[in-house]
Amino acid sequence: MVWAWPFDGDADLALVACSLAVLLSLLALILLVVQELSSPQSLPLHLTRRIFAAHLFACLFLELRKPMVWSDFATWTLALHTLFFGLCERGQPLFTRILHGPSFGGSHAVLVIYLFTLLKGGAWSLWGWWLHIAPCILHWADGMLNFRALLKAYSPPVHSTNSWESAGHFGPALYFAASRMTLRAWSAGVGYVLLEKIFTAATQPAQAFEWDWSLHKLLQVTDVKEVLPLASTIMAYTAFTHRLFVTPESSEGKRP
C-alpha cells in the first residue's frame, strides 16, 4: 500500500490551500455525523449538500494537477458528483432528476471497478481509495439525510407546477406512466451509459460515432469488467433509487 499524499514539497499555495480545504471539509463531515447522531433535529438540506459539494470539489481540484486527468473516467464522475451536490443544494427538482441517477449509479460503478482492479493486483493508495469510496458514502448519507427532497423531485404531484407531467399533451395517466418509465430507465442505467459514451467520444474521437446498441453487441461480452459498471448501477437503483418512485397520492416514501 502506498500512503501517498496528493502533493509534494514543491506544491504551490493553491494546492496547499485546497488540501487544507479537503481536511476541513472532512472534519465538517465528521461533525455533521456527530450532530445527526446526537440531535433529533435534522440539518437543513442546503447545509449538508454544500459540505458534500465543497469536499468533492476540493478533491477534484487536487486531481486536476495530474497530466491527462480527463482521460480517467473517475475524474468525470467526480465532476458529476460535484455538480449534483452543488446545483441541487436546495433540492432543485429538474437538476435532481437529470443528475442524481447517473451520479448515484456512477459512484457505485466506479467503486466496483476500482475494487475489481485491486483484486486483480493493481496498486492502491489511501488517497486513491478515498477518491473512489467518498462519493458513494456521501450519496448514501444524502439519501438518508435528504430523503424527502429526493422523493419530492422523483415523485411530484401530478398537477404540480414542478411536475413534468403537467405539461403533457396526452392523457394525464398515459403521460404520467411514460415520464415515470423514462425517469426509471434514466436512473437505473441509461444516464450512466450515456455518460460513458460521452467520455469515450471525448477521449477517443475515432470511436465517437461507433455506438453499437444491437442485442448482439450487448450480449458479446469479452471481459467481466465490461459488465460490472452497468450491473453496479442497476444494483444501486434496486437498493435505493426505486424507493423514490411513489404514487402521487402518497406523501411518504419508504425510507431506507
Image (cartoon, rainbow, N blue to C red):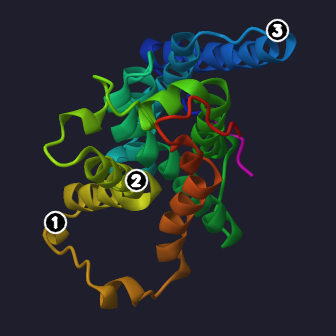
Q: Is residue 197 visible?
A: yes
Can you give x and y, in whole percent of width and height, for residue 119 in the image?
Answer: 70, 69
Q: Mark 2 points at which residue?
A: 73
Q: Which mark sits nearer the N-terminus, 3 or 2? A: 3
Dividing the picture into quadrants, the one containing residue 6 is: top right
Instruction: State left or right for residue 9 relative to residue 162.
Output: right
Other residues around mark 3 within 10 Å, as few (<14) / some (14–19) / many (≥20): few
**What amino acid is at disc 1?**
Ala
Can you give x and y, in whole percent of width and height, for residue 125 in the image?
Answer: 67, 47
**What amino acid is at disc 3?**
Ser
Q: Residue at x 65, y 59 (%)?
A: 123
**What secondary structure is marked by label 3?**
loop
Q: Which mark sits nearer the N-terminus, 1 or 2? A: 2
Q: Mark 3 points at which residue?
A: 39
Instruction: State left or right for residue 95 relative to residue 141.
Output: left
Other residues around mark 2 within 10 Å, as few (<14) / some (14–19) / many (≥20): some
